[in-house]
Image (cartoon, rainbow, N blue to C red):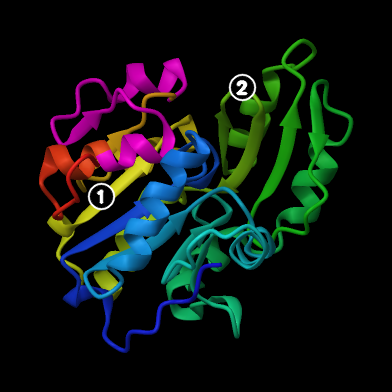
Amino acid sequence: MTTAPTHSDGLHTRKFVLATDLDGTFLGGSDAERARLYDWIEANRDTVGLIFVTGRDPKFIGDLCRDRGVPWPDYAVGDVGTTIATVSPETGVAPIEHLEAEIAAQWGNAGDTVRARLDGHPGLTLQPTDFRYRVSYDIDADSFDASAWDIVLEMGFQPLISDNKFFDVLPDGVSKGPSLRRLVAHLAIQPERVLCAGDTLNDLSMLECGLPAVAVGNSEPELVKRVAHLEHLHMAQAHGAAGILEAIRVFNMHDLPEGY
């Protein structure tokens, strides 16, 4: 069973901060590989900070940590960058309102308008979660009509397709990368101490944002093509959690036990 961080200092004092996507990345790899990474994090809470940067919503993050033995993060950038929050077992995922103010202003009350405009669009199935500043769909690749992309742009919002499975409608200019940079600046963390980790196109803005980065070995091919030129990024051979450990070692961002 994992426990919540018990430190009282801020992340700016940590030697290393992992900012990681969940599905396919932090939750990717074998059971043994995940356990190796999670146990190392728990054993080094005084020097390691953890930020989840995910398309998942706050409820999923809380349930994940309570029920599945995943380490509690210190913070979360959730909902594909539209949530910026503190995380604890007592309060769950609690949005940091002043960091979200610009996101909320850009979105306004657009949810109903977006849902109405895309209602019945071929290949899109609305996800049931009541998102605050985004609307998200599952994609049926065989029937999907790509005109949805242009419809969203015409409405003044930002479309995002990832893993050919998910279609997100976001406030213009909002995604994982800009929201993570906003949080890192707010916490006064030295950027070179932060490692970003991801595996799909909704991680692209995070991997491109200038912080040290890793695309884990199971990354979707389109993401690999888009990040291949980035000098600050390591293209891991290992999948999921093992790919994260590989990058920590390659970048020499924190000491690791022999064999990690």
Q: Residue at x 69, y 20 (%)?
A: 147
Name the spot of residue 243 as percent of width and height, x first. 33, 34
**Count of numbered badges drawn on the protein:** 2
144 or 157, which lies in front? Answer: 144
Vertical position of residue 4 compared to residue 216: above or below: below
Residue 173 in sight from this viewpoint: no
Name the spot of residue 249 as percent of width and height, x first. 16, 42
Task: Say which residue label 1 marks.
Answer: 195
Task: Say which residue label 2 marks.
Answer: 164
Name the spot of residue 149 as percent of width and height, x first. 62, 27
Three-letter residue code for mark 1: Leu
Image quadrant containing the N terminus:
bottom right
Q: Residue at x 63, y 67 (%)?
A: 62
Three-letter residue code for mark 2: Asn
104 or 206, which lies in front? Answer: 206
Q: Any magenta on residue 128?
A: no
Q: Residue at x 81, y 54 (%)?
A: 112
**In which quarter of the view is residue 239 placed?**
top left
Image-based side of 220 in relation to 178, left or right: right
Span highlighted in magenta in the image: 219-245
Name the spot of residue 236 as percent of width and height, x first. 28, 27
Image-based side of 191 in relation to 73, left or right: left
